Image (cartoon, helix red, strand yellow):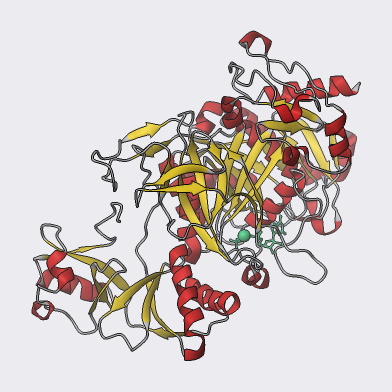
Amino acid sequence: MTVMSRLRAHGRECADRLPPSQPWEHSTRPPRLRKAITVGFFAPTEARRELLIASIGPRARKKASAGVSLEKAFPSNVCTFGSTLLMLSPAQEIARRRTFAIISHPDAGKTTLTEKFLLYGNAIHLAGAVKDRKNQRATASDWMELEKQRGISISSTVLQFDYAGCAVNLLDTPGHKDFSEDTYRVLTAVDAALMVIDAAKGVETQTRKLFEVCRRRGVPIFTFMNKCDRPTHNPIALLDELENVLGLQSSPVIWPLGNGPQFKGVFDRRTRQVHLFERVPGGKFQAPVNVTSLDDPAVRDKLDDDTYAQVKEQLEMLDGAGHPFDLKAVQAGQQTPVYFGSAVNNFGIQLLLDGFLKDSVPPAPRTSVSVSVPGMAQPTAARVVPVNDPKFSGFIFKIQANMDAKHRDRIAFLRVCSGKFDRDMVVTHQRTGKQVRLSSSHKLFGRERETVDEAWPGDVIGLVGHSEFGIGDTLTEDRSIFYNEIPRFPSEVFTYISNPTSADSKKYRAGLEQLLQEGVVQSFTARNAPPGATLLAAVGPLQFEVVQWRLQSEYNAECRLTRTPWTVLRWLSLADGSTTGLAKGTIDYSKFVVASGVSFGTDKFEQPVVLFPNEWTMRYFTEKNPDIRLHELPLDQAPRD
Ligand SMILES: Nc1nc2c(ncn2[C@@H]2O[C@H](COP(=O)(O)OP(=O)(O)OP(=O)(O)O)[C@@H](O)[C@H]2O)c(=O)[nH]1
Ligand SMILES: [Mg+2]
């Protein structure tokens, strides 16, 4: 096969991912490329969806051989497929984006799978492991020191790479319930989810909760049954569990050949081929694969008689009684394609990555809500904002500081929802109504980042240098757009935090302020708090440990945590919903009938709150003070100046 025919074949494969008819929007080549290369592009008509030209000139070839990534050397609407360059229209750029989160109960193997996706997506050459073992590199997504020490994910991570014509935005999320706020926020920024299940454990609690959020959002969910190298549940029983516990119709795409030490490969039900694997030490490299048919004597040799007979029987059952694969239902979130494998051993990863990118969805539109924003006479519009809306818009779903020890700055993670992002563009920060220039924008890969000049809907970009940005904020060129995507959760654990040494009080205050902005925890002012103590609230106690650890390691500041007696916090209002009298203290709190241990305070916007030791004292308060209403979340969700 000649180079040209290989390129053409590859181009056609990529073209299959793109929408059938897209007008050619770049009629001239960018001047930087004019002499250097001949640019490949897709024919504008539906009838001729083929790659027209595919060759590169001397300059680009020189760069490529010097090891310079062509994507780095040229604008992002020129993307590379091997050594082929393609110039894409905006619609094609959007269509090739895949933005998804990996979700599950703790320890199912999300970070391990993420690392293997990077390996198979050619984004890294050697895979790391989640535990900080001697002589073993760490994973790209668990980059925080505390994550490496504990072998768990604490914070979500964004990893962007180009693979097989797709621009992938992959978000690894923490599974632990205490960090679930971060995971829920990430789910607002993605268009699909990959649910990882430990095949020895089945559907666990946290997976169930995360699945519910995905179902409510209607995003497609793909399922990976991991750890097949260990003794697992019967795969048919695992499918039953998806249907019975989650109420989710499943259609297995990849089926395991045995489990535990007997796990020798998988059967691809689409091609009816067997993929036999070889183990690779430590799973650092891609596992060699031997593709054949189920009747091949090599397969019979590898499997013992029982396993072989079982697999045959299971496959017959699936063919007869299983749900046929229905792409429409998958993309509507009504059916989940199921894959089996072992992330740690690199078994079934390529099949999963390719299948997922092929069947998953391009960026979905987000909905703008109607609220009053500063500087505008009219409220914003309640409408669906199409991804191809010409005006740029996006929202911030995460903030993280000190990702890079050298810079010690803070990154706001923005999901682009419509239009095109251009570095240096001026947009409105809707919460304040101020104009901001976005000049420091980054593409993210774990803790690493590089400047990005352009981004399209579906992309996650990191914005540096704007202390005014908060989680949930909308940035837009169109002032009628306001996104209200970020969910809020009632806090369940409380602690006082204070600084025991006055010497580092400045660092302590700066660090705490930063962590509060990240939304790791929330702060309140409690009446009768010990001097110098701030009340912190969180979804789970591990978040307090993270605060303590990060204050120490990132700000070199000591802190002391002191237990509080409360388990429930509620915002207060009068029956008509007003809070002014309560906030300004014109209403006499001593008139309230309260059980012992109940205390009052305010949130950071000076809205009144009440703290209860338990549910019983809260019920007592409700009965005895019928004029007062209690709210799980703050009443004022509208933008504030
Ligand atoms: N036997 C086996 N172990 C695996 C496999 N995949 C992951 N593990 C192990 O399972 C443990 C948890 O893996 P992680 O990738 O950290 O799991 P996670 O889902 O990211 O965990 P959290 O982020 O803390 O929720 C690690 O010790 C992995 O080495 C697998 O396919 N087989
Ligand atoms: Mg993890």
Q: Is residue 455 above or below residue 180?
A: above
Q: Quadrant of the N terminus?
A: top right
Report the number of discs. 0
Picture residue at 68% right of the left edge, 35% below the top: 75
Picture quadrant of ligand 2: bottom right
Q: Quadrant of the C terminus?
A: bottom left
Is residue 227 in sight in this rendering?
no
Picture residue at 56% right of the left edge, 39% below the top: 422
Q: Position of residue 349 (x, y in %)?
A: 73, 44
Q: Is residue 172 above or below residue 620?
A: above
* Residue found farthest to the right: 2
Q: Position of residue 403 (x, y in %)?
A: 61, 63
Is residue 91 in sight in this rendering?
yes
Picture residue at 75% right of the left edge, 28% below the top: 33
Say whether residue 46 is left or right of residue 596: right
* Residue found farthest to the top: 47
Q: Is residue 180 above or below residue 83?
A: below
Q: Position of residue 216 (x, y in %)?
A: 40, 43
Picture residue at 8% right of the left edge, 78% below the top: 591
